[in-house]
Image (spheres, rainbow, N blue to C red):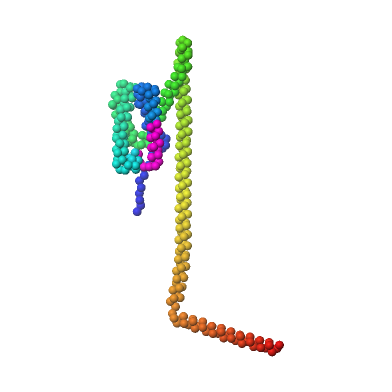
Amino acid sequence: MTEHTTTLKRTLGSFRLWGIAVGLVISGEYFGWSYGWSQAGTMGFMVVALAVAAMYCAFIFSFTELTTAIPHAGGPFAYAYRAFGPTGGFIAGFATLIEFVFAPPAIAMAIGAYLNVQFPALDPKWVACGAYVIFMTLNILGVGIAATFELIVTLLAIFELLVFMGVSGGLGAGRAAAMPLAGLGIAALNPVVLPVTIVLGLGAGWWMARIRKHAADKQHFKQWLTEAIADARAALDQLVSEQLIEAEQQLSLALDDALSRRIEAIEAELKDVDKALKMDAAERSSRVQTANRRLEEARAGRERAEQLLAAIRDLRDHAD
């Protein structure tokens, strides 16, 4: 009976998985950081950001160890089930289900509220419903299409953040450079300083985007090299396994052949022994008589030879 196994098809690559992971957390740049910064101030928000970063580092390292130690689908459910049994697995799975049920509407409402700030004429509820329908349709069409869409949006968001940081940094540097002139009361240079600050900001944004792109390309090449080495190792292991299996089969065939020949030889010897044992008493008696007769003839020949030697010795003694 042939045993059929069902396996999941690998759809997402490392680059799209990176896009999903970054897209899950980059929304904080737009929805959480601005509000938190305005409420807590620079120093207060920095303390909170450092504490959250420390907790996230611990979470990332813990989750990485769990995924390598327990490589099963299910996420927190699989880990809690292994550690705490069915009850712990049920609690973790139910909590994850609640998150997956309530997170998409919350994200859709956040998108509606964000667009309402930019375009007050838009109703945030209708925008949220439209965003929910769009993302639901993308996931229904396939996880690959949804991941590609999220990757594109993530790249656009990263580019916007880099440009914003570069421009704001360049404007800050330009204003810092123009402060001595302003202190001297040279107001006529303001039309010149403003374009310079904008150029500095754009240059800083381009430089930061170039540095980030170089780092991303380096990381992508490192990931590709790691996957290539893993594929080569897997191919080598498969080749060695095939050679070992073939050698084992040949050794088994040679051993079976040698054992067959040895068994045939032993069976032939057993047949000879059985043939000797089945010999009748008359034949054995005839052979014994023949052997005795030949023994008597040999003894008689020996006596005649001794007599002849004695006669030769007598003749030799008389001749002397």
Q: Residue at x 47, y 28 (%)?
A: 211
Residue at screen point 61% across, 87% down: 307
State which quadrant residue 54 falls in: top left
Viewer-nearest residue: 134 or 42: 42
Q: Residue furthest right?
A: 320
| Prevalent SS, magenta region | helix
* Residue in the picture at 47% in, 82% down: 285
Question: For the view shown, which residue lies furthest in the bottom direction?
Answer: 318
Q: Quadrant of residue 57?
A: top left
| Coordinates of residue 221 in the picture (x, y in percent) | 47, 35
Q: Using the image, determine if residue 248 lies above or below residue 77.
A: below
Left or right of 109: which side holds 246?
A: right
- Residue 16 visible to the viewer: no
Query: Is residue 28 covered in magenta?
Result: no
Quadrant position of the C terminus in the picture: bottom right
Q: Nearer the viewer, residue 165 or 37?
A: 37
Q: Is residue 320 left or right of residue 195?
A: right
On the image, the x and y values in percent for residue 279 come to 44, 78
Q: Relative to 251, does residue 216 appear above or below in the rendering?
A: above
Picture coordinates of residue 152, whole percent (x, y): 39, 31
Q: Is residue 59 magenta?
A: yes
Q: Which x, y percent locates residue 130?
A: 30, 29
Q: Does 257 appear above or below 174?
A: below
Residue lying at 47% horizontally and 54% vertically, measured from the top left = 247
Q: Nearer the viewer, residue 66 or 189?
A: 66
Q: Which residues are magenta?
A: 54-75
